[in-house]
Image: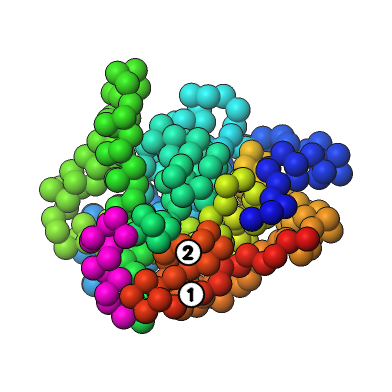
Amino acid sequence: MNNLHNISWYASKIIPELPKKVFKTSPTRLLGGLAYLIVIITGILIIALTKMNLISNFIISIALGFSFAAMGFLGHEILHGSVVKTSWLKNFLGAVAFFPLSVGPKLWVKWHNMNHHAYTQNEEKDPDAWMSLEKYLKRPFIVLIYKIPLQLRSLVSFISLSITFTIHSTRMFVEYILDIKEKGKLTLWAQFIVPWTVWIGLLLYVGITKWTFIYLIPVLIGNFIVMAYISTNHRLNPLVEINDPLINSLSVRVPKWIDILHFNFSYHTEHHLFPRVNPKYYPLIKQHIIKHWPERYNEMSLFSALISLWKTPRIYYKEVNLIDPEKGRVYNTLYKELK
Ligand SMILES: [Zn+2]
Ligand SMILES: [Zn+2]
């Protein structure tokens, strides 16, 4: 693949054109988090302490699920350092925001900031990248899964989005806990155990029926919402050797009110270009990217991106294609020949 550029190549062209305020922290973002936190605590208390019918509980559950996801988006932003500067405060707020999804700040920073951002779509080093045909052939279990017809496989994988974030984050935890030296191991354990203790403790305290509405349904919804974005962030893009954010990332379009509720998480290319810039400035950064490199920028509606995911397999072939190994059918990624 020719003509790829790294993050600093793009950033150096845009930074001189951006106002200084873009690079400042924005603590006012926490007000949105506070609103979600109030919704979560109130919702949990109502279900736990009152006797409401199942439909009312279910409606509250949905509100909790949307709030779980939104808190995750804010936690992501906080742990990139665009909300507050002070290290302990950043970690504390990140831990609170990621609490519903049971991800500790130390795990998240290692997994997301230090590995996913640093090596995006590098098959070996990006923990979120999907495998190539070569790797696939060495994994008998995945080979077995790919014997299932594409439509059925897509149906199962879309339903699984409601658990994928929790499964993947737990996998990341196991990987890092085995890898990490003594220093930091205890923190990683503590940050993993505390949220799970609270959620399991709540089960023992309120009983299975109320717990289903307080935690189980919300965490399934929360998983689904965050994964609906995450699965479109890079999975339609090629694998790359140079971390080129315009080639290896996709920004999706959602209605304005959803962007407000989700802290502009839809602007993923902008995010990979400037992960420490507050997402409220991503629409401005988008304008600059389109002005300079309209042919390189990838954008589609979230709905179209999900449809494309449904229609394609997730095994990479020669980096720029996807392949259904059973049928031998090859599909395009979003990659187009670059001048
Ligand atoms: Zn990403
Ligand atoms: Zn990020």
Q: Position of residue 149 (x, y in %)?
A: 31, 80
Give the quarter of the image for residue 193: top left
Residue in the foreground of this view, choosing between 317 and 181: 317
Residue at 29% from the left image edge and 45% from the top image edge: 170
275 or 54, which lies in front? Answer: 275
Q: Amino acid at mark 2?
A: Tyr
The tag on residue 17 is none
From which residue to which does the magenta span run?
A: 137-149
Q: Where, quadrant-wise, is the C terminus in this rendering?
A: bottom right
Question: What amino acid is found at the position of numbered circle 1 in the picture?
Answer: Val
Q: Earlier in the sequence, mark 1 or mark 2?
A: 2
Task: Please tell me which residue lies in front, 12 or 135.
Answer: 135
In reply to whether residue 147 is colored magenta, the answer given is yes
Instruction: Give the side of residue 331 with respect to residue 216, left or right.
Output: right
Q: Which residue is mark 2?
A: 317
Q: Is residue 190 above or below residue 14?
A: above
| Above-or-below relation of 137 to 202 | below
What residue appears at the point 32 percent right and 21 percent down from the top-left corner?
181
Q: Residue at x 58, y 34 (%)?
A: 81
Residue under the point 64% across and 50% down: 245
Query: Label 2: how many residues lie within 10 Å, few (<14), some (14-19) or many (20+)?
Result: many
- Which residue bears the numbered disc 1? 330
Whole-angstrom CA distance, mark 1 to mark 2, is 8 Å
